[in-house]
Image (tube, rainbow, N blue to C red):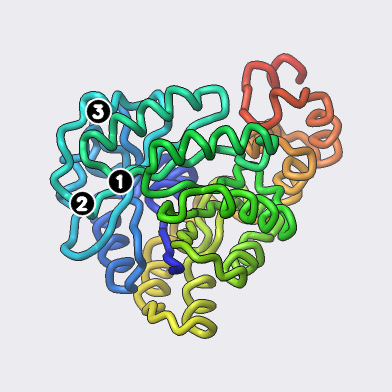
């Protein structure tokens, strides 16, 4: 019932502008496949000019060059960045769509999920900053999700500010109200260095449905990064009789991911910690760091951001108060 979804090629791409190089993309996929990772996220579907060295795709058909038999894949769409009405009927049940959406474009996202289902796709709904929803807003969303009955619903800790008690509370709330056949997912950011412990807390709950946990090689991701694939695979091997092969993972980290890290480092830092404390999107911290703002002043500036602008990065507003 516990599955891992490696999203290095998608979420990790925020670090290097998704420029992994075609050979490295293939190598990462082959490595994760050899490691028996349950789902491999290939990147983003976007309205774009396809570049084989990047993990942006302009069609589902473009994914086929990387598809290996008997492996399950996902690809993500940010709501509004790809017209799902242009999809052809799904010919590969091993490819699932993850649709990420902000609270204000929820209704469009639900329409897109319905459209994708009619075209034969299994869909994962990913409401960003899920923990910013009130109980009433979350229950309303769950009711709409139950009506559409997609493959899964994810809890997305966009701000990286969830503690174990927060994760357990929101999962218990959703688990009680969500259709039993719908999978639950968890995507965390490591701003408070809690991704691993929060994932373990969910696993220990033993919920009676499929639990899909996002992870990245060496925690690759913007800002503080994400849950490390190499940590969670070993934990599941040692404690839950999983059979992930860690050797290909470590080889890929050494040969592909570490060289990227040396150029574009990520991981815990006080600016992202401060952003999480204030409930602000990590991009606020990123911009302030790029301007050379001190940690103390980052905190003072973030205090000026109103609640309705914290969870969704508003560059123009931040520029206006600098």
The quadrant of the image that shows the C terminus is top right
Q: In which quarter of the image is residue 108?
A: top left
Q: Which of 6 and 253 is in front in this view?
A: 6
Q: Residues within 10 Å of mark 1 (few under 14, many from 20)?
A: many
Can the viewer see residue 266? no
Determine whether the residue tagged by mark 2 lies in a helix, strand or loop.
Answer: loop
Determine whether the residue tagged by mark 3 lies in a helix, strand or loop.
Answer: loop
Read off the residue under disc 2.
93
The quadrant of the image that shows the N terminus is bottom left
Residue 207 appears left or right of 169: left
Read off the residue under disc 3.
49
**Residue 6 position in % (x across, y down):** 41, 59
Q: How crowded is mark 2: few (under 14 residues within 10 Å), some or many (20 or more)?
A: few
Q: In which quarter of the image is residue 98?
A: top left
Q: Which of marks 3 and 1 is in front?
A: 1
Q: Which of 42 and 296 is in front in this view?
A: 42
Whether residues under marks 1 and 2 lie with C-beta atoms below 8 angstroms apart, the answer is: yes
Q: Residues within 10 Å of mark 3 (few under 14, many from 20)?
A: few
Q: State which tag comes first along the sequence, 1 or 2.
A: 2
**Residue 305 position in % (x across, y down):** 77, 25
Determine whether the residue tagged by mark 1 lies in a helix, strand or loop.
Answer: loop
Read off the residue under disc 1.
122
* Cα distance between the residues tagged 3 and 1: 26 Å
């Amino acid at each position: 019932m516990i599955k891992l979804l490696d999203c290095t090629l998608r979420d990790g791409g925020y670090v290097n502008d998704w420029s992994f190089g075609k050979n490295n993309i293939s190598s990462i996929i082959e490595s994760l496949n050899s490691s028996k990772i349950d789902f491999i996220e290939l990147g983003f579907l976007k309205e774009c000019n396809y570049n084989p060295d990047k993990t942006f795709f302009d069609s589902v058909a473009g994914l086929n060059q990387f598809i290996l038999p008997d492996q399950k894949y996902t690809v993500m769409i940010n709501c509004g960045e790809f017209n799902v009405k242009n999809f052809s009927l799904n010919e590969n049940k091993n490819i699932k769509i993850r649709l990420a959406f902000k609270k204000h474009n929820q209704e469009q996202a639900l329409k897109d999920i319905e459209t994708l289902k009619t075209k034969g796709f299994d869909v994962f709904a990913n409401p960003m900053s899920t923990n910013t929803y009130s109980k009433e807003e979350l229950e309303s969303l769950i009711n709409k999700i139950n009506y559409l009955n997609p493959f899964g619903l994810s809890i997305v800790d966009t701000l990286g500010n969830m503690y174990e008690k927060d994760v357990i509370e929101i999962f218990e709330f959703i688990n009680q109200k969500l259709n039993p056949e719908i999978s639950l997912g968890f995507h965390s950011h490591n701003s408070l260095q809690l991704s691993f412990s929060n994932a373990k807390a969910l696993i220990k709950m033993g919920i009676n449905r499929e639990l899909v946990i996002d992870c990245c090689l060496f925690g690759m991701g913007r800002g503080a990064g994400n849950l490390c694939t190499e940590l969670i695979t070993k934990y599941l091997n040692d404690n839950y009789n999983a059979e992930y092969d860690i050797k290909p993972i470590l080889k890929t980290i050494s040969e592909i991911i570490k060289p990227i890290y040396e150029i574009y480092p990520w991981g815990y830092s006080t600016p992202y910690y401060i952003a999480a404390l204030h409930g602000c999107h990590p991009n606020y911290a990123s911009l302030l760091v790029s301007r050379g703002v001190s940690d103390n002043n980052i905190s003072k500036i973030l205090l000026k951001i109103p609640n309705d602008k914290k969870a969704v990065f508003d560059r123009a507003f931040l520029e206006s108060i600098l």
